[in-house]
Amino acid sequence: MLMVHMAMLMVHMAILMVQTVMLMVHMAMVAICSYGYANGSYGYINGSDGYVNGSDSYANGSDCYTNGSYGYANGSDGYTNGSYGYANGSYGYDNGSYGYFNGSDGYANGSYGHDGYANGSYGYANGSYGYANGSYGYDNGSYGYFNGSDGYANDGDAIGSYGYANGSYGYDNGSYGYVNGSDGCVNDSYGYDNGSY
């Protein structure tokens, strides 16, 4: 009887291990799929024009967001480590010159950064060259991301010249835009999505 009980215990432990593995798989699936990052069109991971594996996507294609030239992460003009990259390269978002965080003209602590998420000059929000409301700001100022001239959304960087969204050099529909403008990332030469380059 002891041997039978021991065998039953081993079977139960094997079942528990299988269930644990299944739980881990489900948790990984939830982590990947939540917020739609994975498989949808223009999704972050596997969708068409997605961040990782789609054609001319964010990760490994030429002129894509991560490792190709003009990519977001490690390529030249990439977001992270390349020249003009978002993170560590010159004109990068994080640590390079004109980077988002610590580089010169960076978002936070670099020269022209002024820890400027909100009110400093060249800061994120309200100062001149600020990200939000100042000139060259990301939101409402000139060259701002959203509503200012050269902003991301409705002026400048968005719909206007050098705009991130719809203007020239814009991220979405303008020339050098990320999505549909010339120099877009995906379907044209050097383009992020559909524009030329």
Image (cartoon, helix red, strand yellow):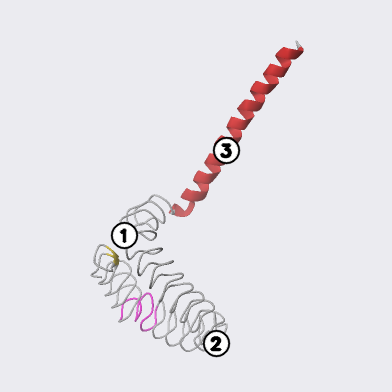
| Whole-percent x, y for residue 190 in the image | 28, 69
Which badge, 1 or 2, is on the more N-terminal residue?
Answer: 1
- Nearest the eye: 78 or 174: 78
| Whole-percent x, y for residue 45 in the image | 41, 53
Q: Residues within 10 Å of mark 2 (few under 14, many from 20)?
A: many
Quarter occupied by residue 195: bottom left
Q: Which residue is mark 2?
A: 120
Task: Say if the magenta span includes residue 159.
Answer: yes
Label 1 or label 2, whichever lies nearer to me, is: 1
Quarter in which the C terminus is drawn? bottom left
Quarter occupied by residue 148: bottom left
Q: Which residue is mark 3?
A: 23
Main secondary structure type of the part rendered in magenta? loop
Circle 2 SS class: loop
Quarter in which the N terminus is drawn? top right
Label 3 or label 1, whichever lies nearer to me, is: 1
- Nearest the eye: 4 or 130: 4
Q: CA distance from mark 3 to mark 2?
A: 48 Å
The mark total stands at 3
Q: Which residue type carries mark 1?
A: Asp
In the figure, is residue 144 to the left or right of 16? left
Circle 3 SS class: helix
Residue drawn at (27%, 71%), measured in percent from left and top?
183
- Nearest the eye: 108 or 75: 75
| Whole-percent x, y for residue 62 in the image | 32, 63
Label 3 or label 2, whichever lies nearer to me, is: 3
Q: Which residue is mark 1?
A: 56
Magenta segment boundaries in residue numbering: 147-160
